Image (spheres, rainbow, N blue to C red):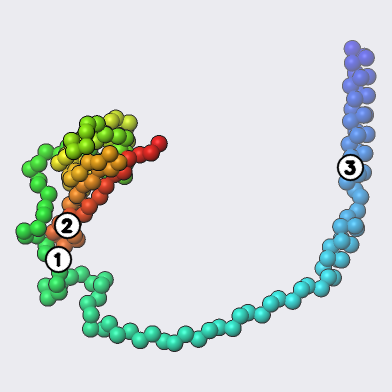
Amino acid sequence: MGSFIMRYEFSLRVAAIALLVLLAGCAKGTRDLEEQLAEIRSRQGSPVDPLPAMRDFPPFPYTAYDLRDPFAPFSEDDNAPSGGGAGPKPDPDRPKEYLESYPLDSLDMVGTLGVIGDLTALLKDPDGVVHRLRLLNYIGQNDGQITAISEDRIELVELVSNGNGGWIERPASIALDDE
């Protein structure tokens, strides 16, 4: 037991001496660093280039005071698009098809089946399921109806609200995914 205590005391003495040596190395002054900083501060800086001269632009006269404000809502005397009436509108009684629950940009065309003139489109939904689609099927969240199927794309027409209670037709397409 006595040799263990002696080894322990020896280890403590060696550790204490090593610590003192390390601390002595840290006690060295920072004079060289301060001298280098003083030398850097004494250097003369380079002159800054002057700012470029400002150009004068002629004033632009605004002459559209008598035209309709594009940010104001339509009024009765404006040539506003009709709010309802005889234009296209979605059929509320039509049962929704499965792919109408997904936005168009989440659907990928992966191929076609059949011959030109009688093609069936293959679309993959976000869940990875591939669906077969024919002309006049509906896809997308804006009552998009397929109007043409070619080997590299599906063309459709969507019904989008015009913001005034009516609907407008908007063409859209989904191209073949080249992965």
- First in residue order: circle 1 vs circle 3: 3
Q: Quadrant of residue 40?
A: bottom right
Residue with the most extreme top position? 1
- Label 2 CA crowd tier, 10 Å (few <14, some 14–19, many 20+): some
Left or right of residue 88, residue 11 in this image:
right
Circle 1 sits on which residue? 81
Image quadrant holding the N terminus, namely top right
Residue at 15 percent across and 41 percent down: it is 136
- First in residue order: circle 2 vs circle 3: 3
Image quadrant holding the C terminus, namely top left
Circle 3 sits on which residue? 23
Circle 2 sits on which residue? 168
On the image, the x and y values in percent for residue 170 come to 21, 54
Label 1 to label 2: alpha-carbon separation? 10 Å
Q: Quadrant of residue 131?
A: top left
Type of amino acid at the residue the image marks with label 3: Leu
Vertical placement of residue 91 versus 60, above or below: above
Label 1 to label 3: alpha-carbon separation? 85 Å
- Relative to the observer, which residue lies in front, 11 or 47? 47
Residue at 32 percent across and 31 percent down: it is 128
Label 1 SS = loop
Residue at 19 percent across and 61 percent down: it is 163
- Relative to the observer, which residue lies in front, 31 or 90? 90
Type of amino acid at the residue the image marks with label 1: Pro
Label 3 SS = helix
Q: Is residue 114 visible?
A: yes
| Label drawn at residue 52 | none
On the image, the x and y values in percent for residue 111 come to 30, 34
Label 2 to label 3: alpha-carbon separation? 82 Å
- First in residue order: circle 1 vs circle 2: 1
Type of amino acid at the residue the image marks with label 2: Ile
On the image, the x and y values in percent for residue 32 come to 90, 57
